[in-house]
């Protein structure tokens, strides 16, 4: 199950990605917002992030205008490693090396075609599990626990 969330500026891209997930028969839960009325990204980042941290959803996809605001907000939730990407290499590496659990995309930055490419590589790539990456992620978790 994939968690989805967005503000008004990410709505159109999220809806396009939902069609793509439907085609791939990938299940998702949409935490809103559902209309183009102005909405605050932190609200939807939190709902989506909590679904990932609780284990209800395996991974998350978040959308705002740039992907930046919603990634900053999601990363405030303990256990979230959200990455804002607009290139395929980073979307792949953030799963392989950072074990990122949320991908954030900018509806005003990437095309639907590019977003599909990024979503596919993000969802299809597994964490490498290599010792050095586990060590580095644990350092980040430690940092999170000290504040
Ligand atoms: C909304 O206009 C916009 O600021 C928001 O979607 C996002 O891009 C913030 O980072």
Image (cartoon, rainbow, N blue to C red):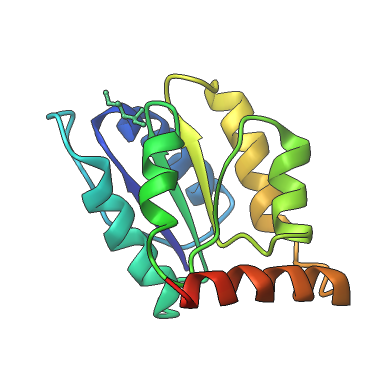
Q: Up-down: is 76 above or below 64?
A: below
Q: Quadrant of residue 8?
A: top left
Q: Residue placed farthest to the front in the image?
A: 146
The residue lying at 69 percent from left, 44 percent from top is: 91
Instruction: Report which quarter residue 119 is drawn in.
Output: top right
Q: In which quarter of the image is the C terminus?
A: bottom left
Q: Where is residue 46 in the image (x, y as percent from the top left)?
A: 29, 59
Taking depth in this image into account, of 20 and 115 the one nearest to the observer is: 115
Ligand 1 quarter of the rendering: top left
Q: In which quarter of the image is residue 36?
A: top left
Q: Is residue 38 left or right of residue 111?
A: left
- Residue 106 position (above or below residue 42): above
> In the image, residue 4 lies at what x, y percent?
38, 53
Q: Residue at x 67, y 76 (%)?
A: 138
Where residue 60 sits: x, y (%)?
47, 58
Q: Which residue is drawn at 63% across and 27% down?
A: 114
Q: Locate residue 128 relative to residue 17 in the image: left or right.
A: right
> Residue 14, how many percent across, how many down?
39, 38
Left or right relative to 132: residue 112: left
- Residue nearest the observer in this picture, 111 or 134: 134
Q: Is residue 35 left or right of residue 93?
A: left
Residue at image position (86%, 71%) is 132
In the image, is residue 39 above or below residue 24? above
Residue most toward the left? 37
């Amino acid at each position: 199950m994939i968690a989805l969330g967005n503000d008004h500026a990410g709505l159109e891209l999220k809806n396009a990605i939902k069609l793509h997930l439907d085609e791939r028969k990938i299940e998702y839960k949409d935490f809103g917002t559902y209309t183009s009325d102005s909405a605050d990204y932190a609200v939807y980042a939190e709902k989506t992030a909590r679904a990932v941290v609780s284990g209800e959803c395996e991974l998350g996809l978040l959308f705002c205008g740039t992907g930046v605001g919603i990634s900053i907000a999601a990363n405030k939730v303990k256990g979230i490693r959200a990455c804002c990407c607009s290139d395929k290499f980073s979307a792949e590496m953030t799963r392989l090396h950072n074990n990122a659990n949320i991908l954030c995309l900018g509806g005003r930055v990437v095309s639907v075609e590019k977003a599909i490419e990024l979503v596919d590589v993000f969802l299809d790539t597994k964490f490498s599990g290599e010792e050095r990456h586990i060590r580095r992620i644990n350092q980040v978790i430690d940092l999170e626990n000290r504040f």
